[in-house]
Image (cartoon, helix red, strand yellow):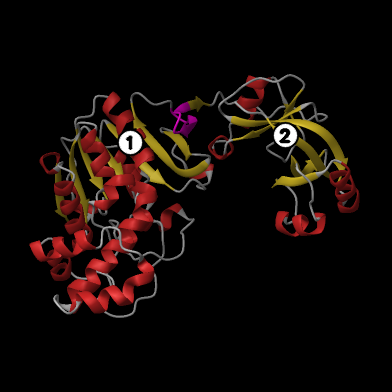
Amino acid sequence: MGQVTDLDTFSALLTPEGQELLAALRDHDPADDLAAATRLRRTHAAPLVSAALSQARLRQRAAAKFGDDARRMYFTPNGVEQSTRVTVATHRAARLAALGVRTLADLCSGIGGDALALARAGISVLAVDRDPLACAAARANAEALGLAELIEVRCADVTEVDTAGFDAVFVDPARRTKAPTRGAAHSASARGGGRATGGRIFDPEAYSPPLSWAVEAARTAPHAALKIAPGVPHEALPEDAETEWISDGGDVKEAVVWFGASVTPGGRRATLLPGGATLLGAGLPDPEPGPVGRWLYEPDGAVIRAHLVADVAQQVGGRLIDPTIAYITADELTQTPYAAAYEITDVLPFNVKKLRALLRARGIGIAEIKKRGSAVSPEELRKKLKLEGKNSCTIILTRVAGRPSMLLGRPVRA
């Protein structure tokens, strides 16, 4: 089925006929696309049917990011791919609202996902993107969710927009290369850079617009936030800003560079959603490594990306198991939201034969296999272990003092 690639087809979805089709496809199973298309084309134009089926599929994909709102929203393929998860956007919007921000320029706004969260936080938003289709979707989304009075959508090049007079600026540059297209009608990007979704870009200066431009735009406003890839090199971060790495449900979603009088210049922060625990680093050196104790801590990915493992180690009175591995060990259990804890029962040199015999003797049939600093594939190891039995354990493949090792234990339930 074709995608919505032009404004006329998208606009047709907003007509009574288009709305009727979308309502009929609300709970549509994509596996039945061909039968549904054949049936609907008897009474509706083929392009409109294809557009409605495409939109139904996009809404189903977007539910993971937007929840129930996705059933009423409008998407482009790039918009689904590049939009912020609603929990993360809500966190960012709440932080801006707490700073007293009431007006904001959202540059590279795409389909308006961030603008919606900002508006719900009571902020008046100018949403700017140079892709006409993305702008049309953003307007439709603001209308569908009853937020049109707080969101103005402008189709323009973000580098030519005057942001003077706004309380804050938010920039979300495109971070993907251009994907292959099938024809001239293929949509431009859902971001301000006007590029289609392709491979990820790791060089911040290859963003569209480049990170250096976004930083200068941010410095012109009282408050600013720049959304960037969580793998950004720390040396590329501006020292007059604070950078926050955000995870949601244990998965690192993004990094945000914050500007303004309220931030800690050069600060590194990790925030864990949905709970909202946030840790601002104190610039601690890495602790000295030592022997594996009874308890092992696996820091959240946002903590690791923010280089705050030492801060968590200090919290739990721990040490590293290896100078190059982000596992912390301690002799006493200390609860922390920033790391998952495991009670360790065995510390062994890596040996598949001995591990298989030990697990068989203990009746281990269920095993969670984790790895860090090990070349061993958990999937291949699982095949070799031939697990049988009713008991369970966690197997951690890692290095201890430079040596390949196996740690056995069980997770500590909060």
Compare residues 354 and 339 and report the one nearer the observer: 354
- Mark 2 Cα shell of 10 Å, populated few (<14), some (14-19), many (≥20): some
Residue that label 2 marks: 410
Q: Quadrant of the N terminus?
A: bottom left
Quadrant of residue 307 in the image? top right
- Mark 1 Cα shell of 10 Å, populated few (<14), some (14-19), many (≥20): many
Please indicate, yes or no, whether residue 129 appears anywhere in the rendered image: yes
Quadrant of residue 169 in the image? top left
Q: Is residue 90 left or right of residue 301?
A: left
Give the residue at x 62% y 21%.
335
**Image spot of residue 81 (x, y percent):** 38, 57
Residue that label 1 marks: 90
In the image, which disc is placed on residue 114?
none
Give the residue at x 26% y 63%.
55
Contact? badges 2 and 1 (CB < 8 Å): no
273 in magenta? yes
**Image spot of residue 65 (x, y percent):** 37, 48
Q: From the viewer's perspective, is residue 377 above or below residue 332?
A: below
Q: Quadrant of the C terminus?
A: top right
Which amino acid does the dot numbered 1 rest on? Thr
Part of the protein shown in magenta: 265-277
Please indicate, yes or no, whether residue 208 appears anywhere in the rendered image: no
Secondary element at image label 1: helix
**Image spot of residue 258 (x, y percent):** 37, 34
Give the residue at x 20% y 52%.
138
Q: Please report whichever mark, 2 or 1, sits nearer to the chain's N-terminal start.
A: 1
Which amino acid does the dot numbered 2 rest on? Arg
